[in-house]
Image (cartoon, grey):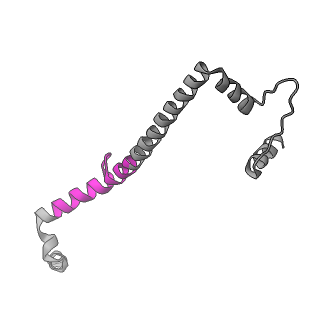
Amino acid sequence: MIRLNLIEKVPPAFRNKYLLTILIFFLWLLLFDSNNLISRYKDMRELHKLKTDREYYINRIEEDKRKLHELKTDNHNLEKFAREQYRMKKPDEDIYIILTPREDRQITRKNN
């Protein structure tokens, strides 16, 4: 008697065993499966980030190859690079280094 009252309170759509099976299946896929939709979404986001990083690094490698080729083939470029990056100078020269405020803060942080 009590069981019949409980079954009658359930909407007719949820009494259908096929619909109930499909709902349980989707709930299982959404939450409990090892390849659930939530983890798949996170994995897809991570994949997109890695592809973006890959593009960045490929472009960076090409740029560095071009610069390396320039340095190996032209002594003028090699001297320019050494002066700019390593602050090398000729014995009779004076060098004045002009820093942006951001660079100045970074150097100050490193020294403290």
- Which quadrant is home to the C terminus? top right
- Residue 31 is covered by the magenta coloring: yes
Q: Say which of 70 and 24 sits in front.
A: 70
Compared across the picture, whether 60 is left or right of 112 comes to left
Secondary structure, magenta segment, majority class: helix
Q: Say which of 35 and 95 sits in front.
A: 95
Residue that appears at 18% across and 76% down:
10
Relative to 94, residue 4 above or below:
below
> Picture coordinates of residue 71 (x, y %)?
61, 23
- Residue 69 is covered by the magenta coloring: no
| Residues drawn in magenta | 20-44
> Picture coordinates of residue 44 (x, y %)?
36, 48
Q: Say which of 28 and 61 sits in front.
A: 61
Name the quadrant containing residue 30.
bottom left
Residue that appears at 48% across and 40% down:
56
Relative to 19, residue 34 above or below:
above
Relative to 75, residue 112 above or below:
below
